Amino acid sequence: MVITSKQRIILIALAFLLVAFMLLSAGNGALYISPSQVISIVLHKIGIYNLVAFDEGQYNVFWIIRLPRVLLGLLIGAGLALSGAALQGLFRNPLADPGLIGISAGASLSAVLTIVFLSTLSATPYYYLIEGMVGYYTLNVVTFLGSCLTSFLVFKVSRTNGKTNVTTMLLGGIAINALCGSFIGLVTYYATDAELRNITFWSLGSLGGASWNTVITILPFILIPIVLLPRLSKALNTISLGEKEAIYLGVSVDRLKIQIIILSTMAVGSAVAVAGMIGFVGLVVPHVLRMLGGFNQRYILIGSSLAGALLLTGSDLLARILVAPAELPIGVITALIGTPVFAWILLKHKKESQFI
């Protein structure tokens, strides 16, 4: 399905808004850098004449702190929203979310276990062995592996006679979420006050740990889904007619399910690993795009990447300026934005018999 003129205008508007919010986010904080200074710093870095004056402090803050944070928010927002859009198209349900298939649950459980047991092992030689192997990224690596493991388990349970049953997958995801929630409750019961604070901070989400190393670490895990998922838009448009109809039209439905689950797990797992739990991005963004421009999956997938990046960049900006010089968890901001929209979706779909 070809992107219409209206959809193209929406995508262009989202791209311009994203650039504007990137400039605002990169400049606002404890040290203010004007948009013109941000542009001038970038031009200076690539060897072009400065447009306006800036000092060394602004230059260092921008390159070392602000730009990695903005890019991390852009990648995570794009990955979360794109994964949500792909899963909603696959399940043909606007309320589908990456958490449904256990990605978030596995990430949460592995993060809680890591926070609690690394603290327990801190006085033993095993702690230094783990630190020597993965260093600062211990939590990120374990969280990503946990999300992949639970997604694999749900996917394995849903396979019958070489085919994937979406209903079984959703029920398996619910079971995994409940099981992981029970274990999280058990582990937190034995956690110390300091560990509970760390768990709470992680569960609310934050981009505060952004660095160039973090950006480079998750870049391939999110860039690959951003490139490949829109290529599946034709198949997703076809499967919206129903699985049997899609098979008759030549779509390999089972292979499509495998591709989307793997790519979504890559994007969401890596995002949760470095930024914690950030809700509602994958749920709300695709639905708003459908409301604005229709059901063309190519438009929705590309638009979700742009709008998700825009939403998280804007949320991070609000998180830093609302209670400055302190900082709100970004998950709080996305929840405050997403909850009313989610409630509206529920009320709207009470009046609808099916999702087109």
Image: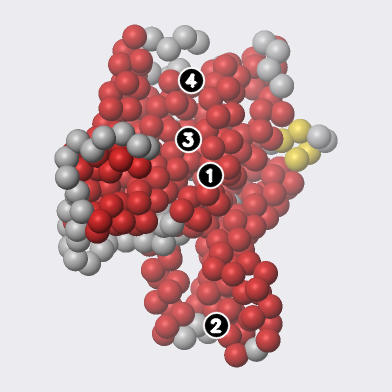
Q: Closer to the camera: disc 2 or disc 4?
A: 2
Q: Secondary structure at mark 1?
A: helix
Residue furthest to the right in view is 161
Q: Which quadrant would residue 90 be assigned to in this image? A: top right
Q: Which residue is mark 3?
A: 82
Q: Position of residue 88 (x, y in %)?
A: 50, 33
Distance CA(mark 3)–CA(mark 4): 11 Å
Amino acid under label 2?
Ser
Mark 2 Cα shell of 10 Å, populated few (<14), some (14-19), many (≥20) = some
Mark 3 or mark 1, which is nearer the start of the sequence?
3
Q: Closer to the camera: disc 1 or disc 3?
A: 1
Q: Position of residue 156 (x, y in %)?
A: 74, 46
Distance CA(mark 2)–CA(mark 3): 35 Å
From where the camera sits, is residue 201 visible? yes
Q: Left or right of 231: which side holds 129?
A: right
Q: Secondary structure at mark 3?
A: helix
Distance CA(mark 2)–CA(mark 1): 29 Å
Q: Which residue is mark 4?
A: 298
Q: Which residue is mark 2?
A: 119
Query: Mark 2 near mark 1, Cβ–Cβ under 8 Å?
Result: no
Mark 4 or mark 2, which is nearer the start of the sequence?
2
Q: Left or right of 202: which side holds 148?
A: right
Amino acid under label 1?
Leu
Mark 1 or mark 2, which is nearer the start of the sequence?
2
Q: Secondary structure at mark 4?
A: helix
Q: Secondary structure at mark 2?
A: helix
- From the viewer's perspective, is residue 300 above or below residue 141? above
Q: Which residue is mark 1?
A: 219
Task: Tell me the residue at 26%/31% (across/down).
Answer: 17
Q: Which mark is residue 227?
A: none
Mark 4 or mark 3, which is nearer the start of the sequence?
3
Residue furthest to the bottom in view is 123
